[in-house]
Image (cartoon, rainbow, N blue to C red):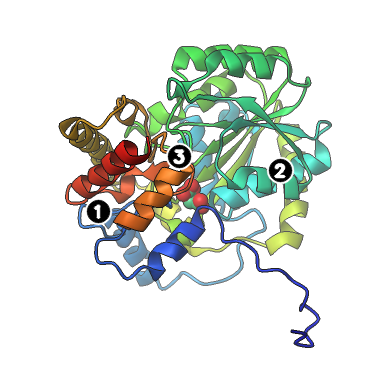
Amino acid sequence: MDSGSVFASLVQAPEDPILGVTVAYNKDPSPNKLNLGVGAYRTEEGKPLVLDVVRRAEQLLVNDQSRVKEYLPIVGLADFNKLSAKLIFGADSPAIQANRVATVQCLSGTGSLRVGAEFLARHYHQLTIYIPQPTWGNHPKVFTLAGLSVKTYRYYDPATRGLNFQGLLEDLGAATSGAIVLLHACAHNPTGVDPTLEQWEQIRQLMRSKGLLPFFDSAYQGFASGSLDADAQPVRMFVADGGECLAAQSYAKNMGLYGERVGALSIVCKTADVASKVESQLKLVIRPMYSNPPIHGASIVATILKDSKMYDEWTVELKAMADRIISMRKQLFDALSARGTPGDWSHIIKQIGMFTFTGLNGEQVAFMTKEYHIYMTSDGRISMAGLSSKTVPHLADAIHSAVTRMG
Ligand code: LMR
């Protein structure tokens, strides 16, 4: 029917493949429903968690009458930027000491990727970016809309449910020289499969020999192993060789600041002079996009990172979240073993980070949603952080039933 609207010819767009899972979950009236779609941490009680240290930092901010709500500079909060670079590159990073890093506060990981990609599309000589196959569903959209041309490199081997290292080396070896390569710094989303440090070293050598430009997406620092330093190791290896790279950081998961949209983009350059020019150009990308970033989330992060006591408290709370996820892996694996579910499920305990890439197909996922009210992305990814001791048996029953009926 012609409503007379100038938009009458629009078609209804599909929901987002990840965030749309939550939309469907919210509409389900079942009391047993379980949302394992979006990567968002839940407690054993299934509730979202605000870290104690975050609450305390917020209290300090609220009580400080000298704080105002003025605009931040285009690049964001200076302290936050310095501390964020330190967090990912290490306190003793030679690149930071030499002022070779340009860091700008952005809207969490997605915003950092987008600003970085827009910058590259304007100023880098190679517009091709290679992303792993598979990768986070938003990656290709972010890069394409920023003006880059997206190609993939082999990453995951469905047969072993592990890394296809040979395929990865072959594809990066055959990549156009100078191309950009997106690397998940740790806890690869959606597969939970990371290269070993030895493999990272080979990737580094290959990429540097071909002049490929690394763009790290670091959305889970501290979440993979429970250690902030261990999870940043791959990034630090690339910075230690003196070469250039980009890194997008998110505080959504590791500080639980999802809705505050707080993150940072750092570009490590060869010299301080280049870094200063890069920063000046990043400002030209940001100003017409959203002018300047929001103040609250970045102030929370800066408050925590600059106080050694609060920082230590954060690492303890972060480790507790990582440990709970690791324990969920063990419990789910044990529950499937106890049920004698056909197949090898050892990847559940081998994969790391927030997600397990179960290997369940779209049909099995749809069955589990329909019959068991379990919500997950159609590629078979489950967010281990959404699981609890109470809900593991329900999930194990659903997987068992899906595999035995439609295996
Ligand atoms: C996810 O993959 O579930 C998270 O990174 C959340 C998101 O924005 O998709």
Q: Where on the picture, by quarter, is residue 380? A: top left
Q: Nearer the viewer, mark 1 or mark 2?
A: 1
Residue in the foreground of this view, choosing between 99 and 214? 214
The residue indicated by pointer 3 is: 361
Residue behind mark 2: 117
Q: Residue furthest bottom?
A: 4
Q: Say above or below: 325 vs 25.
A: above
- Amino acid type at circle 3 is Asn
Amino acid, disc 2: Ala
Closest to the camera, between mark 1 and mark 3, is 3
Whole-percent x, y for residue 317 in the image: 27, 46
Question: Residue shown at 74%/84% (left/top)?
Answer: 1
Quarter of image, res 3: bottom right
Asked whether 373 or 298 is in front, the reply is 373
| Image position of 172 (left or right of 9) | left
Quadrant, the C terminus: top left
- The residue positioned 62% from the left and 43% from the top of the image is 139
Q: How far is the residue under mark 3 from the one under mark 2?
A: 32 Å
